[in-house]
Image: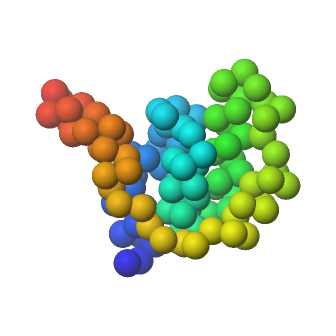
Amino acid sequence: MSSQEIEQRYEPVLTLFLAGRLPGFNHARHLAVANILYHLPHGRELMHLGLQITATRAGVPEKYSPAITDDYWDQLDGLLPELSVFADVMDNQIHTLSRS
């Protein structure tokens, strides 16, 4: 799958993540997003940006750590997550589109 296809497939997830508004952002979801970004140009930089925005929006900018992010990035397996991992985001996207 090309990086463009990956970006299109996961667009709602990436948009919410980069806005600092991805719901249910726990460690597992963090790694799933990282594995998506792993396949995109400048994915590491986008991961840093999204995490910094998320921490800042949550009022805890000190929780963002570039060093920790880089350590985890180097351990990624690069496996793309199933869309079902983001069912809440995808379902919400479908409902939003159907109301338009």
Image spot of residue 37 (x, y percent): 55, 62
Please tell me which residue lies in front, 27 or 95. 27
For the C terminus, the image quarter is: top left
Q: How is the image coloured?
A: rainbow
Q: Quadrant of residue 76?
A: bottom right
Most foreground residue, 20 or 68 = 68
Q: x, y (%) of residue 65?
A: 82, 45
> Is 7 on the left or on the right of 70, as rendered?
left
Q: Is residue 2 left or right of residue 70?
A: left
Write the residue at 54% across / 64% down. 35
- The relative height of residue 55 versus residue 71 in the rendered view (above or below) is above
Quadrant placement of the N terminus: bottom left
Residue 53 visible in the snapshot? yes
Residue occupying image coordinates x 58% and y 68%: 38
Query: Looking at the picture, how far across and down is residue 66, in whole percent?
Result: 82, 51
Which residue is farthest left? Answer: 98
Q: Is residue 75 above or below residue 96?
A: below
Residue 42 seen anywhere in this rendered image of the structure: no
Q: Is residue 90 left or right of residue 16?
A: left
Single out the residue that lies furthest toward the top: 59
What is the quadrant of residue 94 in the picture? top left
The residue depicted at 52 percent of the width and 47 percent of the height is 29
> Residue at horizontal 28%, vertical 34%?
92
Looking at the image, the residue that sits furthest to the bottom is 1
